[in-house]
Image (cartoon, rainbow, N blue to C red):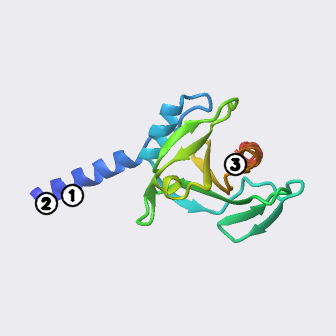
């Protein structure tokens, strides 16, 4: 009997931990941070990337799209949805607000970006879906690549909002 009670309690705690309120689009960075870190995520087929972005070469690889900008910057786009499956994972990293950006798009600072200082990692939130955009730069073109990544992220955000 005790095993049944403990099992039920464990399942309820796991379920509660996996559930979190989706922040409104005008929520604070802290609210998005809590939602991102408390939610279990799993890769999903992307629907938010426009089929064409002027000057960008886009290669679809199923769950991710590989982009090359007119300046030569390499980007990887993917989306995730909440999941309770065994292969799901919690959001990791700290969300950093982007100056002059009112959209729910943030830069992620994490162990990955510390180990790979030539990577810019962005995340955007639309309802229960998040998208990630990883852009590669070198020390001389970081700002240009960052601007291009923000542009692609805003277009993806628009397309995802249209789909809602």
Residue 142: numbered disc = 3
Mark 3: secondary structure: helix
Image coordinates for residue 8, horizontal then vertical, percent: 23, 54
Q: 94 or 51: nearer the eye? A: 94
Q: Are discs 1 and 2 less than 8 Å apart at CB? A: yes
Q: Nearer the viewer, residue 45 or 73?
A: 73
Residue 116, given in percent of the width and then of the height, sits at 54, 58
The residue depicted at 54 percent of the width and 28 percent of the height is: 28
Q: Earlier in the sequence, mark 1 or mark 3?
A: 1
In front: 84, or 134?
A: 134
Split into 4 quadrants, where in the image is the C terminus? top right
Question: Helix or strand or loop: what does disc 1 sit on?
Answer: helix
Residue 1 makes an appearance in the image: no
Q: CA distance from mark 1 to mark 2?
A: 6 Å
Outermost residue, left side: 2
The spot of residue 86 in percent (x, y) is 40, 66
> Residue 7 has which mark?
1
Residue 157 figure quarter: top right
Could you give the CA–CA distance between mark 1 and mark 3, rounded to whole angstroms? 50 Å
Q: Earlier in the sequence, mark 3 or mark 2?
A: 2
- Residue 14 appears left or right of 150: left
Q: Is residue 5 left or right of residue 126?
A: left
Residue 33 visible to the viewer: yes
- The residue tagged 2 is 3
């Amino acid at each position: 009997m005790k095993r049944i009670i403990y099992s039920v309690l464990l399942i309820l705690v796991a379920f509660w931990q996996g559930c979190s309120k989706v922040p409104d689009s005008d929520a604070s960075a802290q609210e998005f941070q809590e939602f991102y870190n408390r939610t279990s995520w799993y890769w999903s087929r992307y629907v938010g990337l426009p089929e064409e972005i002027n000057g960008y070469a886009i290669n679809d690889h199923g769950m991710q799209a590989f982009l090359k900008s007119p300046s030569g910057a390499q980007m990887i786009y993917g989306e995730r949805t909440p999941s309770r499956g065994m292969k799901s994972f919690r959001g990791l990293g700290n969300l950093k607000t982007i100056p002059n950006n009112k959209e729910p798009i943030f830069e992620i600072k994490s162990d990955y970006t510390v180990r790979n200082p030539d990577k810019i990692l962005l995340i955007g939130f639309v309802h229960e879906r998040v998208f990630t955009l990883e852009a590669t730069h070198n020390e001389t073109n970081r700002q240009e690549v960052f601007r291009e990544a923000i542009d692609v992220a805003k277009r993806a955000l628009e397309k995802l909002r249209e789909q809602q």
